[in-house]
Image (cartoon, coloured by chain):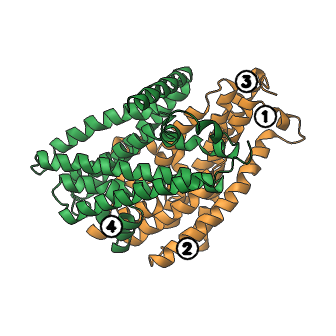
Amino acid sequence: MKKHARVWLQLTNCAFMSYTTNRLDTFSYFIGKTVRFGFFALMIFSIFRFTDNISGYGKYEALLFFLTFNLIDSLSQALFRGVYVFKPDVQRGQLDYLLPKPVNTLFYILSRLTDMLDIIFSLLLIVLTMLVIQRLPITWGGVEMGWYTVLIILGLLIIIGIHILTVAITIRTEESDSIIWLYRRGLYLGSFPPEIFNSTGQFLFTYILPIFVIVAFPVKALLGLLDWQNILAALGLTILWLGGAILFWKSSLKKYSSASS
Amino acid sequence: MILLLYFLWVTLAKQTGRFAGFTPEEIATYVLLVNILRAFVFGNQTRLMASDINKGTFSVNLVKPFSSVSYYYFHELAERVIGTLAAIAETLVLTYLLKINWVIPNGYTVWIYFTLATILAQLIYFSFSTLLNYLAFWSREAMGPRFLFEWILEFASGAYFPLTILMGGVFFSILYKLPFIYMIYHPIMIFLQKGPGSDMPVVVYGGIIWLVILIILNRIMFNFGIKRYTSEGI
């Protein structure tokens, strides 16, 4: 654990150096992320000029869905961005050089590129989320906040599973990393309450591609709208996605031929 | 994204019968048309020119017997045609699965103005995009500004929501004066024949004026930029 923390810190340090070298790009990307966030927030505030609820959720509840989506997306972008630069390693056979390193290969692949901008952005989002939570028209306690945190962690574990799945599929096909883009685009569906979708959509994005488990379940737990059966379902889906992805990774690694090295 | 936008806006329109002046059918048509126009107007290959300038491979186009701008335009157009056909197919599938009723305009005049506004939208976007790509003459860091530009453009053009929902606010009055609005919002408003932007000749003339301004800016920037071009990396 300590060794991996040291490796991560070193990799993060390298990423930081890269960001400080490309200052114009770094500044523009950060402003770009802020603009994207600001426009979506403006959209939500504008919606509430015409109505007082979205599928029964008030302004601050809708904002909480949006902020939780952003927080989870930013955290996963910040920590697991390495998956986006993995495909060339397989195509050029450079995975050979990663496998013998004295560090968990999967950990190295996922975390070798830390996105400093998303780390900063995540901190801002945590502050904004706390401000919005304080304005919710409900009373919540430590239990609700505890479940909110636990379910966010479960959501991040499912996201790790999706990233591992992407890595494993890339090893098998040597070209496809499109599943990560399917996930990235799909996660946007969680930025609003799931009740806006029809029942088929809700089922599909809860149990097949668990977007609502990742984003909506933590919010619903905080709002006191999630029953224990759904909490158990979240736990089961996390085990299924993460465990299944690790097994698939192990099986895919056996297929790696290093053909082009 | 199309699924999110469709369900969000249609849910809101059904909740109140009419949302920000749009009926459920109108807002559904808006979302589906955005899906098609995005593919035709925005495309995916727009960073190629900046990348070529940075790598030095831009030189290859300079010695060819046609303008580099037209090369990139037709290169992108080919990709856009494929993307648009895919978007049309996707939209038709969604229309069938979700049983969506489109609002179809009456009269050929609307169709002519809609076509003109869409072609102008694509040319305005390309001119803007080229302007951003020319930044690569001065800096190797042209991708960050492009990322920023693309997000501003996506929202300010109305690709996520009908800008009418901002009406009455300070943002709407600012956005209404910018050229981004000609890329998605105005063509769709012409199609739907409603709201600000449905005055068809005014929209087309406005678009032409912006296009001329952008072409002039492009010429100026290219003439300055090419003097700094070093073909580094060749």
Q: Say which of B214 and A232 sits in front.
A: A232
Same subunit, tags 2 and 3: yes
For the residues labelled 3 and 4, say whether their Cβ atoms are less than 8 Å apart: no
From the image, tell me which residue sits under label 2: B92
Same subunit, tags 3 and 4: yes
Query: Gap in Å between the C-alphas at discs 2 and 3?
Result: 46 Å
- Please count the marks in the image: 4
For the question of whether residue B201 can be seen, the reply is no
Q: Residue at x 79, y 45 (%)?
A: B71
Q: Quadrant of residue A42?
A: top left
Q: Residue at x 55, y 28 (%)?
A: A25
From the image, tell me which residue sits under label 1: B58
Label 4 resides on the chain identified as B
Which chain is rendered orange in the image? B
Task: Indicate left or right for A23 with A219 as reference.
Answer: right
* Three-letter residue code for mark 1: Phe
Q: Nearer the viewer, mark 1 or mark 3?
A: 1
Label 2 resides on the chain identified as B
* Three-letter residue code for mark 4: Thr
Numbered label attached to residue B11: 4
> Image height check: is B29 above or below A23?
below
Task: Indicate left or right for B227 with A196 as reference.
Answer: right
Q: Colour of chain A?
A: green
Sequence order check: which comes first, mark 3 or mark 4? 4
Q: Nearer the viewer, mark 1 or mark 4?
A: 1
Same subunit, tags 1 and 2: yes
Q: Position of residue A30 (x, y in %)?
A: 45, 32
Sequence order check: which comes first, mark 1 or mark 4? 4
Where disc 1 sits, the SS reads helix
* Three-letter residue code for mark 3: Phe
